[in-house]
Image (cartoon, helix red, strand yellow):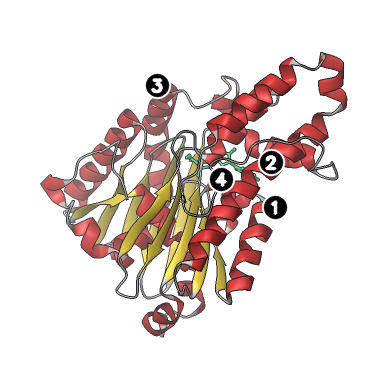
Amino acid sequence: MILAFESSCDETALAIFDPGSGIAGEWIHSQIELHSEHGGVVPDIATREHLRNFGPLLERARASGHWEKITRIAVTRGPGLAACLALGAAAAKAAACALRLPVVGVNHLRAHAWSPFIPVHSECRQGFDERLSGLLPHLGLLASGGNTLLFSISADRGIRQISSTRDDAAGEALDKGAKLLGLGYPGGPAIERLALGARADAFDFPRGIGGRGDLDFSFSGLKTSLRYRVQAMTEDSVRARLGDLCASYQAAVIGSLAYKAAAAAEQGGYRSIGLSGGVANNRGLRSAIEAVARRRGARFLPAEPRHTGDNAAMVGFAAWIDAADAERFAGSALRADPGAYL
Ligand code: KG4
């Protein structure tokens, strides 16, 4: 069994993953409320909170009845906030030292990339390898507050980045848009709520880089366009048209993600199309990517809602399924790497 640590941003999380029986337990402490007072994640507060929260979470994991069966420790090594990652690595190394167990470092993006396969593993733990080969090659869209990527997983389980954002991440665009509209943090859920029942075609917002040839994303123009739009309106009219503004802005984000995912899907004979990261909670985005998968005859694999945002279950799962990558960062080779890429 693998004891996994996650602390790359504002979630302190632990999980115990058992390759034979799935997720044996997971414990998470979210700091969203603390950061929402500041309109976004404050790195110093996040680090202090991780230090405060790992102890109590470890006590709960210890009382779970699986503690004695742990044989390996895994921790997110990056990308993420430098001090938060360093604190997680220190906590994992200390646990490894105390329990006399090996420790490996997991790439946060690879963990998100594999997260849609956790439910597949829960469905069929015995024939998992066979089931997995039936789902590869895989096309994945990872959209979170810090990252937006399209990637593929080949039949031999190799991960390759296809494209990424040239500026803001999709979640960041939603968070910044929400801030401009005077909504709270995190912005994605607030915008989704207000957009319900409103007109998505009320305002015409730009949808990133045009053309199917360039698969990169860009959201900075969209954000600027919203700023100009709001500046040209009176406060009262912004208030009166808040739903339409949210629906149109959200439609531009979803539209650009789905358009590029569809273009990427045309370029490979993918058997499954996955969706992960915090923005994967968005119902509109889920249906848009599901439609892309349906059109290509591929299975739609969304990460489960409890594993879209940052969590430790995906770290434990990746340490197992992507063991070769994690082993490259074992023991003394394990370092926090804020700029780690896929
Ligand atoms: O994966 P995650 O925790 O990101 C990082 O820590 O990088 O996801 C957080 C992001 C935020 O930008 C948040 O606004 C967005 O995911 N998000 C959503 C929804 N729920 C969370 N965006 C759109 N619709 C949602 N329902």
Q: Is residue 310 above or below residue 156?
A: above
* Amino acid type for the residue under numbered disc 3: Asp
Question: Is residue 334 toward the left or the right of residue 67 in the image?
Answer: left
Q: Earlier in the sequence, mark 4 or mark 2?
A: 4
Viewer-closest of 194 and 14? 194
Which is in the foreground here, disc 3 or disc 4?
4
Which is in the foreground here, disc 3 or disc 2?
2
How far apart marks 4 and 2 lie (CA) works out to 18 Å
Residue under label 2? 250
Which is in the foreground here, disc 1 or disc 3?
1
Residue under label 4? 210
Contact, CB < 8 Å: mark 3 with mark 2? no
Q: Earlier in the sequence, mark 1 or mark 3?
A: 3
Within 10 Å of disc 4 (Cα), the crowding (few <14, some 14-19, many 20+) is some
How far apart marks 1 and 4 lie (CA) works out to 21 Å
Q: Earlier in the sequence, mark 1 or mark 2?
A: 2
Which is in the foreground here, disc 4 or disc 2?
4
Residue under label 1? 284
Which disc, if any, is residue 137?
A: none
Q: Residue 8, can we see it?
A: yes
Q: Earlier in the sequence, mark 3 or mark 4?
A: 3
Which disc, if any, is residue 44?
A: 3
- Residue at point 39%, 21% (across, down): 44
Contact, CB < 8 Å: mark 1 with mark 2? yes
How far apart marks 3 and 4 lie (CA) works out to 38 Å
Question: Is residue 329 toward the left or the right of residue 155 in the image?
Answer: left
Quarter holding residue 49: top left
* Amino acid type for the residue under numbered disc 4: Gly
Mark 2 CB near ligand 1 (8 Å cut) = yes
Q: Residue 63, can we see it?
A: no
Q: Regarding mark 3 in the picture, which secondary structure is present there? A: helix
Q: Is residue 36 above or below residue 124?
A: above
